[in-house]
Amino acid sequence: MVFSTVLIAGIASFWRVYEFAHYRPPLIDVPAIEAPSLSIEEVIGAAARHYGVDPLLVKAVMAAESGFRHQAVSTAGAVGLMQLMPATAHEMGFNPMIASDNVFAGARYLAFLLGRYARKRDTLRWAIAAYNAGPGSVDRYRGIPPFRETRTYVKRVLGYYSQFRRSGRIITASIETASPQPAPVMTD
């Protein structure tokens, strides 16, 4: 006898699969387990550890991007705490509309950018600029692009990063989340 699981409307149902195709026993409904409510700080820590990024950098980018508002949407279409374009988040295997996924996708993208510019003298500044303007712009200008918005953004993120490193600011907001699954490795 083999068991099969079907998830319908958040309820896990188990079917016994018999050798006889015509026989189907009734479904047994088992309520889904509620995901724990985690603080933004805990999600940042988990994402940062998972991708090997400083959690204070993730927090600094989040502060500059959304001001810790999980429902923030930019005029360009970037969404969530880390203000990711949906295509970027999906490329990394995450749903940007789920707050914890948005943080994990942002941390993964930061790790990717830090790795991409690891051999540069200003790795951190280049990675932050690429988070804002895109790696194509940073590569084209061989550094921080001459866009006022990007230059201001880099200064703002570095300011938050410095502030968080000095003060150890605690974030008290919480989000409903389930632990996201690790996404496949992103390549250029």
Image (tube, rainbow, N blue to C red):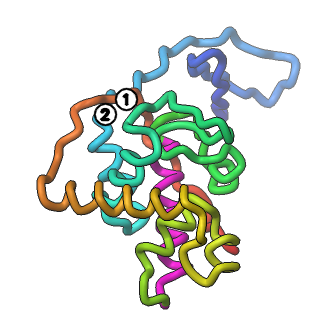
Crowding near the residue tagged with mark 1, few <14, some 14–19, many ≥20 C-alpha atoms within 10 Å: some
Crowding near the residue tagged with mark 2, few <14, some 14–19, many ≥20 C-alpha atoms within 10 Å: some
Residue sitting at x 41%, y 48%: 64
What label does residue 175 carry, if any? 1
Q: Residue placed farthest to the left in the image?
A: 167
Residue sitting at x 66%, y 31%: 4
Residue sitting at x 32%, y 38%: 40
In the rendered image, which quarter contains the N terminus? Answer: top right
What label does residue 156 carry, if any? none
Q: Residue placed farthest to the right in the image?
A: 22
Residue sitting at x 42%, y 23%: 33
Q: Secondary structure at mark 2?
A: strand
Name the amino acid, label 1.
Answer: Ile
Does residue 122 appear left or right of residue 161 in this picture?
right
Relative height, residue 58 to residue 177 (above, below): below
Q: Nearer the viewer, residue 187 or 81?
A: 81
Disc nearer the start of the sequence (1/2): 2
Name the amino acid, label 2.
Answer: Leu
What label does residue 38 carry, if any? 2
In the rendered image, which quarter contains the C terminus? Answer: bottom right
Q: Looking at the magenta stretch, what is its main secondary structure?
A: helix
Q: Which residues are magenta?
A: 101-119
Relative height, residue 105 to residue 139 (above, below): above
Measured as percent of width and height from the top left, residue 141 is found at: 65, 79
